[in-house]
Amino acid sequence: MPDQIKADFSSLVLSIASSAAMSCGLAPDQETGETRIDKNMAKFNIDLLMMLREKTKSNLTDDENHLLASLIQDLQTRFIQM
């Protein structure tokens, strides 16, 4: 029997970041295998991560805070490069 995927904050953040990465053309769509750029969706997902950072301020572990900050910084850099 396969392991259960743990539903936690990091999984949520990584899921949103994955959607942002796909929208930036950094990863193929898992269903179609196609890589495409959707700036509006990329911006939406990055903004969603930034909103989560603001709403969870002072409530995250150091690891969660570092993960979220790193992902936002990387995705913002990739978005600017598009």
Image (tube, helix red, strand yellow):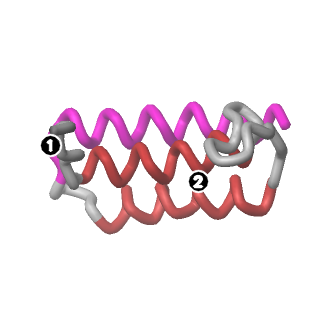
Kindly identify which residue carries mark 1: 61
Q: Which residue sits at x=70%, y=36%?
A: 28
Quarter of the image that includes the N terminus: top left
Viewer-side residue, 27 vs 33:
33
Label 1: few (<14), some or many (≥20) within 10 Å?
few
Measured from the top left, where is residue 77 in percent x and y? Answer: 68, 33
Q: Which residue sits at x=47%, y=56%?
A: 49
> N-terminal of the two: label 2 or label 1?
2
Left or right: 20 as drawn, with respect to 28:
left
Viewer-side residue, 73 vs 23:
23
12 up-or-down from 74: above or below: below
Q: Secondary structure at mark 1?
A: loop
Q: Which residue sits at x=16%, y=57%?
A: 59
Tell me, for residue 46, which label it has, or none.
2
Task: Quadrant for residue 41, please give it.
Answer: bottom right
Residue 78 counted in the magenta span:
yes
Q: Secondary structure at mark 2?
A: helix
Label 2: few (<14), some or many (≥20) within 10 Å?
many
Measured from the top left, where is residue 40 in percent x and y? Answer: 78, 62
The amino acid on which the numbered mark 2 sits, given as a three-letter code, is Ile
Segment tinted magenta in the rendering: 60-82
